[in-house]
Amino acid sequence: MSGIIWLASYPKSGNTWFRVFLGNLLGDSDEPASINRLGKTRIASSRLLFDDEIGFEASDLTADEIDRLRPELYIHLAQKVSGPVFMKIHDAYLYLDNNRPLIPRDATAGALYFIRNPLDVAVSFAHHSGWDYDTTIARMADNGFTSCEKSDRLHNQLRQKLLSWSSHVKSWVDQTPFDVHVVRYEDMHKNPFQTFAAASRAVGLDPSDDGILLALEHSSFQRLQAQEDVEGFIEKPPSAKKFFRSGKIGSWREELNDAQVRRIVEDHREVMQRFGYLNVHGEVLDE
Amino acid sequence: MNQAYYVFGLKILSELPLPAPMLSDPAEAANPDIVIEYGQTPEKLDHPQVTGVRYQASTDELLLCVDGVARYWIRKGRRILVTPHPQSSLERILIFLMGSAMGALLHQRGILVLHAGAVAVNKGAIAFAGPSGIGKSTLSAALHDRGCLFLADDVCAIDPAGKKSSLIPGFSRLKLWADALDKLGKNKDDLQSVRWIKNLEKFFIPIQENVATPVALQALFVLDAVNTERIEMWELTGMDKINQLISNTYRMGFLKGLGKTADHFRQCAAVAANLPIVKVSRPKRGFQINELADKILERVNA
C-alpha cells in the first residue's frame, strides 16, 4: 500500500529511536546504520520539503497559509511515492479553519503513536531544549504550545502546534480518521522484541525474527550514545548537550521535586491513568 | 501602459511595474526578450511532465498557482501571463513573479539558476547558496553594509559561457526578517514591510545601485549550520562541486518538468570546472553574521 506512514509523537518519546530501528531494519546491513543518515524518514514540518514540492516558498507565507497547503503537500507526496514512506511528525492531529485535517486520510498508509510517561518526558524535554523543569512542565500543560512559531525570523522547520501533552495524545489516539497503533516508550525498553515487532506489523512490515533482533541490537541506546560521542548527531539542537542523553525510565524520581511531580499528575491525570502511568487513586505506577 | 526594463541581462517589456532599471530609449524596447502581461491563464496544462502541489511543467510551459495571489503562465522563456486573484495586491503578485515565475523563465531559457544570493567585491562577484533560513540574505545585507554592490537575492542567474562563469544581476531587492535586522543593527521602523500583515515580519532593505552587466564570478560559498563552535571554510573538489551546484539549483522540480536535467548537469559540470566552491560551516547557534561577512571578505581578498 502506498502512502505515508506517520511516526507521530510529542517530542522525546522514542520517535528517533524507532527511526534508527527502522533504518537498521530496512537497511538490512550487517553494520549498524549511521544515526546521521536517517534521511529516509523526513519530518513533516520540513521547510525544504514544502518549498521543493509546492513551487513557491513558505517564507513568503504566514503560518496559517502554510498550514492550509500542508494537507495537499502530503497527498501529493503519497501519490508520488511507489510504496509506503515513513514520516516523523510532532504536530498534534489538528483540523484547520476549513475543517480539513492537517494530515489527511488520503495521504495515510498507517500511523504509529509513541507515548512516554510525561514525568520522564518533562526531564528529557527540559534537557533537550535547555529549559528548566518548571518552564517545561508549564509548556507541557499549555494548549497553545507551538514550536517554530516566531514571526520575526525564518525557522528551519514550519510552525507546529503541539498543544498540551494530554491534548497531543488524545488528538492522535482519538481524533484521527484512520487507525493508530500506540507504542509505549516503556514497552520499547521492557519488551523490545514484542513491542518493535508489533509496531512493524501494525504498519504493514513483515520482518523476520532475526531481522528484528539484529536491528534492535544495532539501535540499542548504548550504540546510539557511542555513535553520538564519536560523530555527533545532526539532529541535536544546540541547546542540548547530548541528544541520546539517558534514555532511562523513571529518571524523574531523581530529577523532579514533589511539587513538580504533583503538578504533572494534576495536569495530565486522565491520560496518564488511561495509558497505565497512574493507578485509579492517582498514584504513579512503578514501571 | 507597458514599460521596458533590463534585468537578468534581458530586455523585459512589462505591464506590471517592476522594481528594476528602466530602458528609456523607445527603440530599445521594440524587440524585448520577454513580455510580461496580465491576461487569461489556463487552470491546468494539457500534458504536464511534472506536477507539483501548485505548479505544472512541460517542455515549453510552466503554470504556477499561488492561492489568493495569482496564476502565472510562463511560456518558452519569452512570455509570462499573469491572472491576478481579485483580492490580491501588486506587491503580493510581484513577490512570486520575481521569484518562482522568473526562476522558471530563466530555466526555460537554459540559464543556470541557483537558489543563492550574490554581491560584487573588488575582484568580481561572489555568491552564497544554502538552505532557506541559513542566512544568505542576511549575509548579502552584511556585505552590502561593507560596501559590496548588491547583485541578486534568492534567484541567482549564472552564465557558464567562457573561461569564467559570470553572474547575471537580478532584481535589486533584498528581503530580511526582523531578527536579522536586529543582528545588523538596523531599525525596522525605517523600512518598508514586504507585506502589511500580522505574523510576517519581513522588510525590504533599500538598494540604491543597479548593476546591469554580468560580473565575473569569483567563488560560490555554500553555507551549512552544524553543531560546532566556530566558522570553518574549505574548498571543494571534483564531484562534490557538481553535486553542490545541483542541490542548490533553484526549484529542481521545474527543471525536471522542462526536461532539461541533462543540459543542466552539463552546465553544472562546466561551472564546476572554472569556479572555486567553498563550503562554509557555521555554528547552529550563537554565530555572528558580522564575523562571517568579515571572514568571507578576508578570504576573497587574500
Image: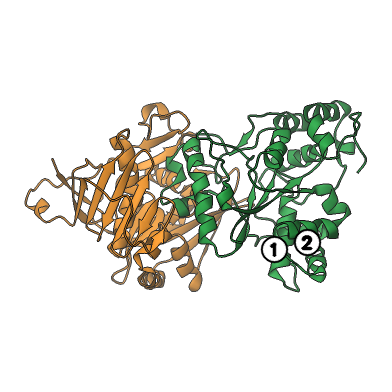
Chain colours: A green, B orange
Is residue B122 visible in the rendered image? The answer is no
User: What kind of residue is marked 1?
Assistant: Gly
Q: Which mark is residue B6?
A: none
- Tag 1 residue: A23
Q: Secondary structure at mark 2?
A: loop
Whether the residues at callouts 2 and 1 have beta carbons within 8 Å, the answer is yes
Is A233 or B231 nearer to us in this picture?
A233
> Could you say where residue A101 lies in the image, as x and y percent from the top left?
56, 41
Is A160 or A136 nearer to us in this picture?
A160
> Could you say where residue B95 lies in the image, as x and y percent from the top left?
34, 42
Query: Residue drawn at (44%, 65%), measured in percent from left and top?
Result: B246
Q: Which mark is residue A219?
A: 2
Q: Secondary structure at mark 1?
A: helix
Q: CA distance from mark 2 to mark 1?
A: 9 Å
B193 lies left or right of B239: left
Query: Residue drawn at (52%, 48%), measured in percent from left and top?
Result: A47
